Image (tube, rainbow, N blue to C red):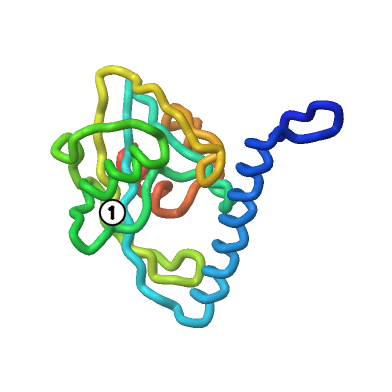
Amino acid sequence: MLAVTWGKALPGELVDLGFRTAYRVAHHMLRAYWSVRKPETCGALVAVWNEGELLVVKNSYRAQYTLPGGYIRPEETPEQAGVRELFEECGVEMAPSRARVVYDATKLFEHRQDRVIIVEVTLDQRPSVQVDNREIVWAGFRSLRDVLAMPIVPHLREYLMQRQT
């Protein structure tokens, strides 16, 4: 949301808007590429739980909510990738040893075979979460029931349904 002063957006907000636009355009281009190439991708998401609530994020370029995460670099474990992405996207820092793999599945998503590994961590204290308002435009803790009522990516829905049983 742009703050407007006498009909003009503040300079920092214009920069954020430019980044969000670039992310949306890049994501549309990737989806077009994926629709032709049908690649196999692999990423890690991190499920951060506190007092029965889950940290979910909203990317600027996707309609669904998801967990903090991204691609796993060649030298990384899923735990390392998950906590790296958690720090990059939400400003929450922790040791990879605190996370454990709880989900690993491949699904057709956005024209690609998308392997997602979810690592999970439960925190005793709720961390302060800060988003960049560029790639991530919102983050917050929500109950399992509330998250399942939201539009969420397929891997997250399957993980939560398995966790619920």
The answer to which quarter of the image holds residue 47 is top left
In the image, residue 110 lies at what x, y percent? 51, 66
Horizontal side, residue 2 vs residue 152: left or right: right
Q: Mark 1 points at which residue?
A: 117
The answer to which quarter of the image holds residue 16 is top right
Q: Look at the image and tell me in which quarter the N terminus lies.
A: top right
Q: Of residues 60 and 105, which is closer to you in this image? A: 60
Q: Of residues 159 and 67, which is closer to you in this image? A: 67
Q: Of residues 56 and 164, which is closer to you in this image? A: 56
Residue at the (75%, 35%) spot, across then down: 9
Q: How many labels sit on residues?
A: 1
| In the rendered image, the vertical position of residue 119 relative to residue 74, given as above or below | above
Residue at the (47%, 29%) spot, across then down: 140
Name the residue type under label 1.
Ile
Residue at the (25%, 28%) spot, across then down: 122
Furthest residue toward front: 11
**Secondary structure category for the residue under label 1:** strand
Horizontal side, residue 3 vs residue 28: left or right: right
Q: Look at the image and tell me in which quarter the C terminus lies.
A: top left
Furthest residue toward right: 6
In the image, residue 162 lies at what x, y percent? 32, 45
In the image, residue 141 lies at what x, y percent? 44, 27
Structural crowding at the residue carrying mark 1, measured as other residues with C-alpha within 10 Å and reported as few (<14), some (14–19) or many (≥20): many
| In the rendered image, the vertical position of residue 117 relative to residue 142, given as above or below | below
